[in-house]
Each structure stands twice: as structure tokens, then as C-alpha cells.
């Protein structure tokens, strides 16, 4: 059995969302950026050139975007990352694990910074 695990990644998925603890964030919204790193064996897909043997990265990116755009909003980006991770694992049975990074570069934290976010890892049970 092939135990090799490869990766599919999508970086900087840009979507507008309304997540945050402040009412202004929920009302006005802001841009969020999502990175996905999916652990998945890719040998069979590489050998057969068959999309069903991999995870469709366009669909994965669309699922992440849907989570960011969903209403009602979450207060925490940790909860947003969890929702994205759960959706990816549910949609792609071949994915063994997924790492989700959610960045909120305009977070109202009261000081200047370059970037802010969370990174969470999810594995299949």
C-alpha cells in the first residue's frame, strides 16, 4: 500500500466577509484571505490523469470562499477556519488532513501591523 502523502495547496483565496467581535465589522465587513494545504496521496491521479483521484482545487477554493461569505458571521476567525476545515474534509474523502490559514489584514486591533490570522490543522478521524 502506498502511504505517501502529497499536498495540494491554494494560497490567498480572497473573499469579503463580515466576521468579527465588533458590530462595525459585522455591518461593514472586510477582506479575508484563506490558504489551504490539503494532504492527499496524488500518485494515482498523476498516473491516470483522472480528476476523481484527487481533490478539485477550484472546488476547494470555492468552498473556502463560501464560508467567508456566509451569514450569519462568526465572531472569531478561529471558528471560520474550523468551518472551512470541516467543509474540505467532508467534500473530499481522499484528503487525509487539511491546514487552513485565515488572515484578516484589516482587523481592528488598535495598532499598525502587516498581517494577522490563525492557522489550524484538521485530520480525518
Image (cartoon, helix red, strand yellow):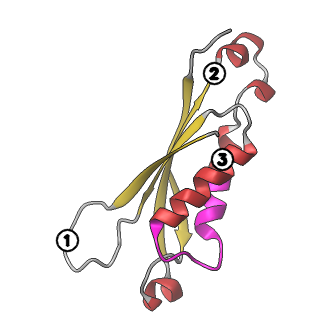
> From where the camera sits, is residue 62 visible?
no
Residue nearest the observer in this picture, 34 or 85: 85
- Name which of mark 2 and mark 1 comes first in the sequence: 2
Label 1 crowd (10 A; few <14 / some 14-19 / many >=20): few
x and y percent of residue 79 in the render?
52, 65
Q: Quadrant of residue 44?
A: top right
Q: Does residue 87 sit above or below 15 in this rendering?
A: above
Q: How many marks overall?
A: 3
Which stretch appears magenta? Answer: 62-77
The answer to whether residue 76 is magenta is yes
15 relative to 44 in the view: left or right: left
Looking at the rendered structure, the secondary structure element under dot 1 is loop
**What residue appears at the point 60 percent right and 60 percent down from the top-left corner?**
83
Looking at the figure, which quarter contains the C terminus?
top right
Q: Which residue is mark 1?
A: 112
Which one is in front in this view, the residue at disc 1 or the one at disc 3? 3
> From where the camera sits, is residue 76 visible?
yes
Q: Residue furthest front?
A: 125
Amino acid at each position: 500500500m502506498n502511504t505517501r502523502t502529497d499536498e495540494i495547496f491554494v494560497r490567498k483565496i480572497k473573499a469579503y466577509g463580515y466576521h468579527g467581535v465588533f458590530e462595525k465589522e459585522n455591518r461593514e465587513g472586510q477582506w479575508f484571505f484563506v490558504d489551504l494545504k490539503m494532504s492527499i496521496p496524488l500518485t494515482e491521479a498523476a498516473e491516470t490523469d483522472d480528476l476523481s483521484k484527487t481533490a478539485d482545487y477550484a472546488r476547494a477554493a470555492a468552498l473556502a470562499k463560501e464560508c467567508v461569505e456566509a451569514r450569519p458571521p462568526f465572531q472569531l476567525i478561529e471558528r471560520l477556519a474550523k468551518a472551512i476545515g470541516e467543509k474540505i474534509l467532508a467534500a473530499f474523502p481522499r484528503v487525509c488532513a487539511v491546514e487552513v490559514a485565515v488572515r484578516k489584514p484589516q482587523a481592528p486591533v488598535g495598532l499598525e501591523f502587516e498581517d494577522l490570522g490563525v492557522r489550524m490543522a484538521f485530520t480525518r478521524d
